[in-house]
Each structure stands twice: as C-alpha cells, then as structure tokens.
C-alpha cells in the first residue's frame, strides 16, 4: 500500500539583493509588462528546467541522512588519499547549494510574474471544490 | 481502501519531469504510469483506471493539452482526483479545468515537498470521499 508521505524540508530562505529589488520596484512603478509570447517561452524553458532540477535534487536529498553521510565520508577519504589537500564539501552540502539556486530561479519567476502581470485574482494554487468531481 | 489509492497517472510532455516524478512516487509506494502525450495517457487511463492523475496543462509536444485530456478523462470517470499543473496563470484555463471537474490547479514549477503535499492532499480527499460514500 502507499504509505503516508513525509514532506521534505524546503531549503533556506531565498535571498534577494538591493539591485534586484530596485529593478522590481521600477517594473512595478512603470507598469512594465512582458509580452505573453516571451513569458510563455520563459516559463516553458526556465520553468520546466527548474522544475526538473528541483525534483531531482529534492529526491536525492530525501535519501536517509546516514547514507548521505557515509557516502560523503567515503568521498572525502578517497579525495584525501588521492593526493588532494583542499577541503571538500559533503554530498548533501553540494546538493543543497544547487537546490538553493534552483529555488532562487523559481522565486525570481514568481516575482517577475507578480510584478509584470496586471490581472488580479489568481492564486498560486487553486483548490477546486472536491465535491464537484465526486460522484 | 488504501489499495484503491495506489495508481497514479502522470502526464507531462517533458520526459525528465515525468520520469523523475515517477521515481519519487514509486519510492513512496505508488504504482505510477507516465505518458508523454495524450493518446498514451488515455490508453493508460482506460487500462489502469488510476485514482490520481497529475496533468500538465501546456503540452506543445502532445496532440491534446491537459485540459482536453481532463475532458476525456471526465467522460470516462468522474471520481479520479485530477491535479492540473500549469506554467501560465491563464484564468480561462483555470475556469475550464474547474468546469470539467479538476480538483486542483497549481502553478509550475513545484518542488519535491510540494509534489508530495499535492499527492498527500489527494489521498486525504479520496479518503474523505470514501468515508462519505461508505
């Protein structure tokens, strides 16, 4: 049977920088919009790739911590005995950093959508009345 | 009851996304079928009668888009829990999905925790529905 699903923690908060904020503010103040064809292309390419990356990395990070730790220890050991002197991150640190960057892109797309689309009323996630479909 | 909730159909014309979604949900104990286009999706739906469908709304590589697939699914089955994933927030698509009996309409990209949450919510809704109908 299908087990109840556990939610994996989302990565750290998305950072924003003053330069990006300034530009978003400018877009809002000047009512700058994006042509629907350009927006469609942006979401088709960036949206789908971000979606795939975040699923793949999120899936990898859901591997039990002890396995990731054991894998990291072996990787660090092999790295050291092969003559490297620098420090190397653990597997989950690498993955988490990559995932945080995927989140930055997702967050950027959400904010760009919000800043450039003028029609009101859409929610990110619409729960439709379940009774409608139920028989 | 849980036995009835085992099958999920994922329809997405992006192969990487479909395959990864299947891997994630299979590891959670579901039987997952993927289709990269509408004809395969409807064939699988006929044969397997999944309890949950995750449908991509915009599928340029498919004959029918997610809304049309939903329409076909609803002709065959009114009870399957249908989650629509869209990359564009077009009000007319949301209305069409609502009128055709979709259960959820969510903007992509979603992430791993959100995918699990969507399926969890679907399971809860199906359980409730089961309770309602005895």
Image (cartoon, coloured by chain):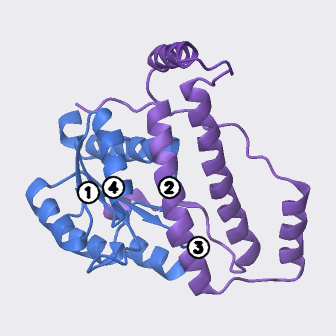
Chain colours: A purple, B blue
Query: In the rendered image, which quarter is residue A97 located in?
Result: top right
Alpha-carbon span between mark 3 and mark 4: 20 Å
Is disc 1 in the same subunit as disc 3?
Answer: no
Residue B127 shown left or right of residue A103 in the figure: left
Q: Secondary structure at mark 3?
A: helix
Mark 1 crowd level (few <14, some 14–19, many ≥20, 10 Å Cα)? many
Please name the residue that numbered disc 3 is placed on: A42
Graded by Cα atoms within 10 Å as few (under 14), some (14 to 19) or many (20 or more), the crowding at tag 4 reads many
Mark identifier at residue B80: 1
Q: Which residue is mark 4?
A: B18
Q: Which residue is denoted by mark 2 in the rendering?
A: A51
Q: Work out whether disc 3 and disc 4 sit on a shared chain.
A: no
In the foreground, B127 or A31: A31
Q: Label 1 vs label 4: CA separation?
A: 19 Å
Q: Chain of mark 4?
A: B
Residue B31 in the figure: left or right of residue B90: left
């Amino acid at each position: 049977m299908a087990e109840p699903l556990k939610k994996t923690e989302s990565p750290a908060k998305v950072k924003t920088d003053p330069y990006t904020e300034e530009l978003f503010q400018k877009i809002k103040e000047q009512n700058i919009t994006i042509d629907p064809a350009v927006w469609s292309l942006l979401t088709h390419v960036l949206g789908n790739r971000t979606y795939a990356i975040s699923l793949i990395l999120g899936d990898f990070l859901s591997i039990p911590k002890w396995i990731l730790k054991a894998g990291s220890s072996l990787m660090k050991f092999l790295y050291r005995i092969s003559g490297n002197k620098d420090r190397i991150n653990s597997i989950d640190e690498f993955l988490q950093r990559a995932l945080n960057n995927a989140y930055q892109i997702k967050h950027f797309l959400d904010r760009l959508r919000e800043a450039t689309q003028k029609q009101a009323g859409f929610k990110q996630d619409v729960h439709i009345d379940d009774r409608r479909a139920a028989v | 009851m849980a036995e009835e909730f085992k099958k999920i159909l994922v329809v997405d014309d992006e192969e990487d996304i479909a395959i990864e979604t299947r891997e994630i949900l299979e590891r959670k104990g579901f039987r997952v079928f993927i289709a990269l286009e509408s004809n395969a999706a409807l064939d699988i739906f006929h044969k397997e009668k999944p309890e949950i469908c995750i449908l991509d709304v915009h599928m340029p590589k498919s004959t029918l888009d997610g809304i049309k697939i939903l329409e076909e699914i609803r002709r065959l089955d009114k009870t399957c829990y249908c989650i629509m994933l869209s990359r564009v927030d077009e009000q007319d698509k949301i209305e069409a999905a609502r009128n055709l009996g979709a259960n959820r309409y969510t903007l992509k990209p979603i992430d791993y925790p959100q995918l699990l949450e969507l399926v969890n919510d679907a399971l809860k809704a199906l359980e409730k529905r089961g309770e309602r109908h005895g």
